Image (spheres, rainbow, N blue to C red):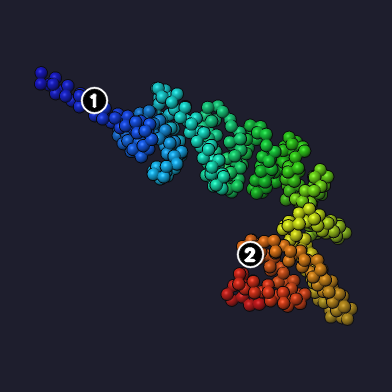
Amino acid sequence: MKKIAILVILCLFAVDMANAQKREVNKAKRTLNRGNLDLALGHINNAINDPSTQDDAATWVLKTKILIELAATEEAEYKGLVEDPLNDAYDAIRKADELDTDKQNILEIQQTLLILSENFFNAGAMAYNENKYKEASSYFLKSFNIGESFGSMDTSTLYNAGLSAEIAGLDDVAYDAYVKVEELQYDQPYLYSSLTSLSLKKEETEKAEEWIKKGRKRYPDNLDLLFSEANVYLTSGNIPEARRVLELAIERDPDNANLHYAFAVNYDQMSKDTLYTEDERHFAYEEAIKAYKKAIEIKPDYFDAIYNLGALYFNEGIQFFVDADNILREGYTNENLKKASELEEKSKTIWREDAQPYLERSINLINEDDKNYEIVLRSLRELYMRTGQQEKLEETNKIWEEKFADPGEEE
């Protein structure tokens, strides 16, 4: 009789212990329903840390729900309780699914996953709007992956993941997302521009050509894809083909300053390419000037076009100085001195009348923190020095010394 009594007591003690731990789960539910998220989190963590309830799928489902609420709360007292509640919730629901071997909680797990997917999407949109592109990409990808597990392919969410990753500089993540989106036939022409650009960054020119041809076939009238196609040819050095594409684009959109600028860059590169004859290079030089001026006419504050045109004239002036020096190397005869002097004067005229107005205009379009400021200022210093504009040289030197000169640099 005593043994039976002891056994009954032990059984009752074991049941009481189990109920005590189960009570932690119940308390977590009640405090969650009341909105006491700090208490709910404490109770569920107690349950998860206990061997009798930590392997129960329902415990992990409840933890997921608490974490989702913590991610969504606007109450300051709860916001700092968990550093990354959404990703922790994702880990928790995966743990619940792993433990749910008898599928007793499958419906609740699926419903919670759908809620979590929506929360990931909303978090992604919020992070994107706050310029937190790396976080946005991660959230969008999680949202897509959850939907995919249900057989739902939300291509717009995956595209957003790729776009966010591209802006964040996560090129491989962006590329993989875009490839999958393209395979799913997502209707977005800019997708092909991005795939092309990312391929060029990886120096995979052939792949870039494949992507842009595929995009152009699917969206033959899209001007941005025409522009991207021209960029591929410019990168690969196929200037004639780039010119053909740009001419086609300009015919369709003659008032697009970017197209005229690209056209100018095309000819600018051609004018420097020694594979072309001197006449062809001179023709390209003149066409580059026309195209830069057209871009500036359409968009008067177009820094890149204005600076490039100034640089084009500047480099032309440099070439005349080089030619003059080469003549003098042949000998200091009267004839050579005369030719060299004429070339130097021609150079100074081009610098003062052509290069200077555009370089000065370009530097007034940017502030001193701009990455291009030092480049433009350096060109102006040399121009003022070679053309004898002492007052302007002193002004420029003062800015240079304050901002860019090394302590031991001498003028």
The residue at 61%/33% (across/down) is 155
- Vertical side of 199 occupied by 36: above or below: above
Disc 2: CA contacts within 10 A as few (<14), some (14-19) or many (>=20): few
The quadrant in which the N terminus is found is top left
The residue at 73%/66% (across/down) is 360
Q: Is residue 308 left or right of residue 330?
A: left
The residue indicated by pointer 2 is 368
Residue 35: name its quadrant: top left
Q: Is residue 64 left or right of residue 411?
A: left
Q: CA distance from mark 1 to mark 2?
A: 75 Å
Numbered disc 1: secondary structure? helix
The quadrant in which the C terminus is found is bottom right
Q: Position of residue 225 (x, y in %)?
A: 73, 42
The residue indicated by pointer 1 is 15
Numbered disc 2: secondary structure? loop
Amino acid residing under circle 2: Glu
- In this view, the residue in front, 89 or 91, is 89
Residue 107: name its quadrant: top left
Res 347 seen here? no
Counting residues from the start of the chain, the first of labels 1 and 2 encountered is: 1
Res 297 seen here? yes
Amino acid residing under circle 1: Val
The residue at 37%/37% (across/down) is 37
